[in-house]
Image: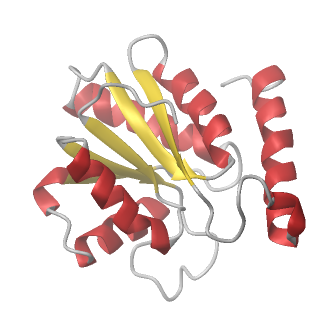
Amino acid sequence: MEREKADVLVLEGFISDYLLQDAINEFQTNKYKLLITTGTPLIYGELLAPYKNTANVAGMSLLKLGFDSTKLVMVGSNEIRNDRTYNSAVALREWLKKNRPQTKSLNLMTMGVHGARSQLLFQEAMGDTIKVGIISMKNFYYGPHSWWKSSKGARETLNETFGYFYVRFFFRPY
């Protein structure tokens, strides 16, 4: 984990419910001023869910757990097919420019091996003006040293590894 000194905690909205309390604990322990959830439109369950976006699902879940609504902002993007993480970061950048232009750093909280790619993409979107720290929470389904022992762990780790190299060497923001 490579945290920045920051008063803004950003939570990727796709995370599993079991990490929501960890986000609240991180927020309280490190005395952040604002928690922002990011996300994209739902790709399944939209007909049943009133929230339509993973930023809203995570945000509303945090509120249900008792998080202070005055310290929570939900920033969703409209992109569903391509570069979802980057588009979430762009939506966040635009919100910060408009509402918190004084922000110089933030910490991004996400799950497992997705963290390295998320940090790269969020930093790309923020440019040189906002430093992005990363807090990558452990995956409940497999450990960092045993990912290869489960189908889910192998798929996610290999997928994120390829994704990281794609972002590192081939990704070009539009």
- Left or right position of 31 against 16: left
Color theme of the render: secondary structure
Q: Position of residue 62 (x, y in %)?
A: 30, 68
Residue extending furthest toward the front: 145
Q: Is residue 22 in sight in this rendering?
A: yes
Q: Is residue 53 in sight in this rendering?
A: no
Question: Which of the 4 quarters of the picture holds residue 97?
Answer: top left
Quadrant placement of the C terminus: top right
Q: Is residue 94 above or below residue 169?
A: below
User: In the image, what residue occupies the spot 88% across and 60% down?
Assistant: 148
User: In the image, what residue occupies the spot 29% across and 57% down?
Assistant: 25
Q: Position of residue 18 (x, y in %)?
A: 47, 73
- Left or right position of 134 against 7: right
Q: Position of residue 134 (x, y in %)?
A: 50, 36
User: In the image, what residue occupies the spot 42% across and 31% down?
Assistant: 3
Observer-nearest residue: 26 or 130?
A: 26
Residue extending furthest toward the bottom: 48
- Left or right position of 101 against 89: left
Residue extending furthest toward the left: 70
Q: Position of residue 42 (x, y in %)?
A: 56, 69
Q: How many marks?
A: 0
